[in-house]
Image (tube, helix red, strand yellow):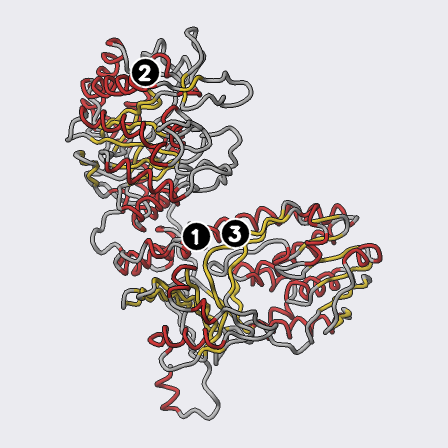
């Protein structure tokens, strides 16, 4: 087989070397536009997982790399005049140019033909002449552009400016620097990569970058290979306290914006994308070189394991895409955290350090405890209790812990009257240990039910039944009980008395009836309905009230520009779209007791083009808080049928984080939060004040109590019901009573938690100098 590789960077060279080893009879040719000895870039970082793969795939390459690694395990967070150190992470880095030399040598040993200083022929020509074309031609891939209709690239250029530099200050650990200056915030990602130098990436938000004066220094096009020397010198001045007299060293360094590259497909015929041509992940969580070399290993293996190119490429993309997309989700969370670092610069340094380390959601509270318990203990200095079991005051209501069971649609009511299943569900959830349990999707009128099986709170019978439920729950536990009130609007069930009412006459989807636009008389009726339902909720004994202003229900329809097309004073601008929701909230606030909690759930994003912006979400939250909301329950989506959410673990938490840290309004995070580790991480980092855990509580109604037992917590925030106390410990199972014997004559010493990078000393160093350096 004849193989053409476009691009002689680490990804392209590593693929060529591996493929040639697996199939010596193949003819592999690489084109690299730069000369063999051209030096670009600085240090690259590898995880232990990636290095294990390299060691297995090509021991010769691994041995050559290992001989030059800078290794360390610490992360230093420099912020607020303090340095917080977290150990136990494990890093290995080396000069990118040395890595390329190692791979160049390996390709030469194996007989791979490499054309240096030579532009590759057009990809169409290569595709016709060769059996396989591997496009490893970088983020600006010409091959990807040629077949854009097949690859369908999505190039997401971000808002921060960054510059890739090195310094002759050799840092001892991966170092994050965040500085508050008069122009805003500046951050640095720095790490050592050999005995003499460290990578030093400076990143600044666009507005801060302009206020610092960098726009005036970078107001021209720089030639290829030229550096923005004036900006480098200004960075040196701004960050002098962290350079300790050392210099910043450019190499074709200029301000750029990071572009996240995604492609709907990675292959077109016999052409396949690899590395940055296929995908990118922000530098704050790892190396593009690492991802490219993992791609190379997977591609070489899949081609070897399958009989033809087409099936080999399909297997490569099928195997590799989920791994890359997982990495990109983590990278996106990290990227957005650094883009918005100004939200967190009022946090105290220990919390800020924890927030930074857990920004991607891959590193968590428990994970950090395992890696470096001393660091986690220092962040927890204010309380030895796990964050999720610390009390929180929600308006006039004191919750014993930070766990909320969110409203659950059960669809078991008859004529709006909750039944026995509602009693069993709510009482079981309340006995399960959470601080607050919310009854769900309760209509303020018969016409406002989403389905005929939804409960209501607009008749005496419904009120009395709810009172029976709250009396039972309060008689068994001090868990607080709340109820969510709503009118489903255009998502309401069909009724004999005509179409549903909505903000605008827009059907939910093609199968739904077209609603009628709410008149002023309708709005007056709705305000009365919400007020009366709130008064009934108070008499029924609920401790908290939540108004449903999200998920495409009636009030949500007023808030979103996608569903509110009114031309009167209740449409148009955000202020207009807020007018009626605020009328309802103020009216409810006037009758809802001050010693109880009043919550509002919103959809902070519509997941559709033209929907709510982040600024809109913040503006809505501020307005709701000013009108009397004690907290915002921050959900997203379900506003339009054509939404395209980006699902994933804790995928909605960034919106709770946005609102909480932009406004100081208490928030509830919700959405795919299912482990106590995630709850602890969210609370301790300050991303939300409370966490709503839904599906996990359906799986295990005693989830909160089991979380307490798993963490060794048995305090007042997680009391077991007296009748169930005998089950508070895990029951014995097969072989759980076995005690393992000692089988090691001498125990191995534990690996040190903290490992710093200490450069090798020159041969002429004196013993005294060596001792002081170590």
Residue beneath disc 1: 336
Q: Residues within 10 Å of mark 2 (few under 14, many from 20)?
A: few
- Foreground mark, 3 or 2? 2
Q: Residue at x 62, y 50 (%)?
A: 320
Residue beneath disc 3: 327
Q: Are marks 3 and 1 in contact (CB under 8 Å)?
A: no
- Foreground mark, 3 or 1? 1
Residue 90 lies in what quarter of the image? bottom left
In whole angstroms, how far apart are the C-alphas of marks 2 and 1? 44 Å
- Is label 2 in a helix, a strand or a loop? helix
- Is label 3 in a helix, a strand or a loop? helix
Q: Spot the residue most to the right.
A: 129
Residue 653 lies in what quarter of the image? top left
- Is label 1 in a helix, a strand or a loop? helix
Tell which of 101 and 667 is nearer to you: 667
Q: Residues within 10 Å of mark 3 (few under 14, many from 20)?
A: some
Estimate the x, y position of residue 177 in percent, counting from the top left. 37, 66
Residue beneath disc 2: 521
Q: Are marks 3 and 2 in contact (CB under 8 Å)?
A: no
Tell which of 649 and 707 is nearer to you: 649
Of label 3 and label 1, which has the lower sequence position? 3
Of label 2 and label 1, which has the lower sequence position? 1
């Amino acid at each position: 087989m004849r193989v053409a590789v476009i691009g002689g960077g680490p990804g392209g060279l590593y693929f060529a070397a591996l493929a040639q080893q697996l199939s010596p009879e193949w003819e592999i040719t690489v084109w690299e536009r730069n000369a063999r000895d051209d030096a670009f870039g600085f240090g690259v970082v590898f995880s232990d997982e990636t290095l294990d793969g390299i060691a297995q795939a090509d021991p010769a390459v691994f041995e050559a790399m290992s001989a030059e690694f800078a290794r360390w395990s610490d992360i230093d967070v420099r912020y607020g005049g303090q340095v917080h150190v977290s150990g136990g992470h494990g890093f290995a880095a080396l000069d990118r140019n040395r890595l390329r030399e190692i791979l160049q040598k390996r390709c030469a040993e194996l007989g791979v033909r490499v054309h240096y200083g030579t532009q590759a022929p057009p990809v169409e020509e290569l595709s016709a002449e060769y059996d396989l074309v591997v496009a490893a031609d970088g983020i600006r891939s010409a091959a990807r552009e040629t077949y854009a209709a097949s690859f369908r690239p999505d190039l997401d250029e971000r808002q921060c400016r960054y510059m890739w530099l090195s310094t002759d200050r050799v840092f001892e650990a991966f170092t994050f620097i965040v500085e508050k200056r008069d122009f805003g915030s500046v951050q640095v990602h720095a790490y050592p990569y050999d005995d003499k130098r460290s990578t030093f990436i400076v990143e600044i938000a666009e507005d801060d970058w302009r206020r610092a004066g960098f726009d005036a220094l970078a107001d021209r096009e720089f030639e290829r290979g030229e550096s923005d020397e004036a900006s480098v010198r200004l960075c040196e001045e701004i960050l002098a306290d962290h350079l300790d007299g050392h210099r910043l060293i450019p190499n074709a360094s200029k301000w750029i914006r990071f572009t996240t590259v995604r492609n709907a497909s990675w292959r077109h015929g016999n052409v396949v994308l690899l590395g940055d041509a296929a995908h990118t992940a922000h530098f704050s969580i790892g190396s593009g070189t690492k991802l490219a070399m993992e791609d190379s290993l997977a591609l070489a293996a899949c081609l070897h394991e399958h009989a033809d190119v087409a099936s080999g490429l399909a297997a490569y993309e099928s195997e590799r895409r989920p791994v890359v997309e997982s990495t990109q989700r983590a990278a996106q969370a990290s990227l957005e955290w650094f883009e918005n670092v100004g939200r967190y610069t009022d946090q105290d340094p220990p919390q800020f350090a924890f927030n930074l380390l857990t920004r991607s959601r891959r590193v968590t509270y428990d994970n950090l405890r395992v890696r470096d318990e001393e660091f986690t203990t220092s962040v927890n200095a204010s309380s030895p209790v796990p964050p999720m079991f610390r009390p929180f005051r929600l308006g006039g209501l004191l919750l014993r812990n930070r766990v909320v069971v969110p409203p659950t649609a059960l669809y078991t009511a008859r004529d709006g009257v909750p039944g026995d299943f509602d009693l069993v569900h709510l009482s079981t959830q309340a006995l399960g240990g959470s601080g607050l349990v919310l009854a769900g999707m309760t209509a303020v009128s018969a016409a406002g039910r989403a389905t005929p099986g939804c409960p209501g709170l607009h008749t005496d019978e419904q009120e009395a039944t709810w009172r029976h439920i709250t009396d039972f729950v309060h008689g068994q536990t001090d868990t607080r009980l709340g109820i969510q009130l709503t009118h489903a609007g255009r998502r309401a069930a069909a009724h004999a008395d005509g179409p549903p009412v909505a903000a605008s006459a827009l059907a939910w989807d093609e199968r739904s009836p077209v609603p009628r636009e709410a008149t002023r008389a309708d709005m007056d009726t709705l305000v009365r309905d919400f007020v009366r339902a709130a008064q009934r909720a108070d008499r029924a004994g609920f401790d908290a009230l939540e108004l449903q202003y999200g998920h495409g229900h009636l009030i949500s329809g007023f808030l979103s520009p996608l569903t509110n097309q009114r031309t009167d004073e209740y449409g148009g601008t955000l202020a207009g779209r807020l007018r009626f929701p605020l009328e309802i909230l103020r009216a409810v606030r006037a009758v809802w007791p001050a010693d109880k909690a009043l919550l509002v759930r919103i959809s902070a994003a519509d997941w559709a083009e033209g929907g709510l912006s982040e600024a809109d979400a913040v503006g809505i939250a501020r307005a709701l808080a000013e009108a009397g909301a004690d907290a915002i329950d921050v959900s997203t989506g379900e506003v339009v049928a054509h939404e395209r959410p980006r699902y994933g673990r804790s995928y909605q938490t960034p919106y709770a984080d946005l609102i909480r840290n932009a406004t100081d309004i208490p928030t509830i995070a919700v959405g795919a939060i299912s482990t106590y580790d995630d709850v602890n991480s969210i609370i301790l980092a300050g991303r939300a004040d409370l966490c709503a855990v839904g599906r996990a509580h359906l799986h295990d109604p005693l989830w909160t109590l089991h979380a307490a037992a798993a963490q060794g917590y048995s305090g007042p925030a997680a009391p077991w019901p007296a009748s169930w106390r005998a089950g508070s410990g895990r029951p014995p199972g097969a072989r759980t009573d076995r005690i393992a014997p000692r089988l090691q004559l001498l125990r191995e010493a534990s690996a040190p938690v903290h490992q710093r990078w200490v450069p090798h000393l020159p041969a002429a160093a004196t013993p005294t100098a060596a001792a002081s350096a170590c």
